[in-house]
Image (cartoon, coloured by chain):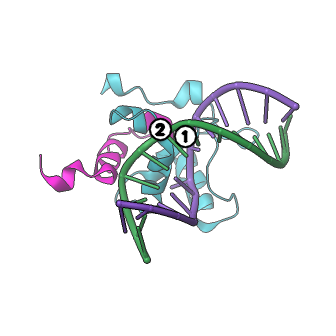
Chain colours: A cyan, B purple, C green
Amino acid sequence: MTSTERRFSERVYAVVARIPRGCVATYGDVAAEIGQPRAARQVGYAMHRCPQSLPWHRVVNARGRISLPVDSTSGIAQRRRLGDEGIVFVGGQLDLARHRWDPALD
DNA sequence: ACTGTGACACAGG
DNA sequence: CCCTGTGCCACAG
């Protein structure tokens, strides 16, 4: 493994790239998937600089809400992208129990 | 080397 | 529901 691949952010991006269409993962899920269950906050930091090529919109917070200002350009884009994948928001939040990605299944 | 900064999470009040 | 405090830790300057 190269030093670049060891970088926390790179590992975050590698996990995000695996989230299937129509599914979501929480910041904590991503952190746990790279072996650092307490680095959820850091995943958020990494997402701030996430490559556009990745399905960044599939990462939401532990309450199934979008962690971006709802009226921000990216916030609106995230909700629209998720909607395009069949994920419905009720009361500003999605159903995590139904859409949460299970890493063990891929 | 040290410090400030968060797209977080969770427990309280 | 809302808000606050605390723990957390990679990253940038």
Q: Can see residue A79?
A: yes
Three-letter amino acid code at the position of disc 1: Gly
Residue A29 covered by magenta stretch: yes
Q: Residue at x 64, y 43 (%)?
A: A65
Three-letter amino acid code at the position of disc 2: Gly
- At which x and y percent is residue A85? 50, 44
- At which x and y percent is residue A76? 62, 60
Q: Can see residue A24?
A: no
- At which x and y percent is residue A9? 34, 53
Above or below, A23 against C2 in this view is above
Residue highlighted by disc 2: A22
- At which x and y percent is residue A83? 58, 47
**Left or right relative to A20: residue A40:** right
Above or below, A32 against B4 in this view is above
- Marks 2 and 1 belong to one chain: yes
- In the picture, the disc for residue A86 is 1
Q: Which structural element holds mark 2?
A: loop
- First in sequence: mark 2 vs mark 1: 2
Residue nearer the viewer, A102 or A38: A38
Marks 2 and 1, Cα distance to the nearest angstrom? 6 Å
**Left or right relative to A16: residue B9:** right
**Left or right relative to C4: residue A33:** left
**Left or right relative to A52: residue A25:** right
The reply to whether dot 2 and dot 1 touch (C-beta < 8 Å) is yes
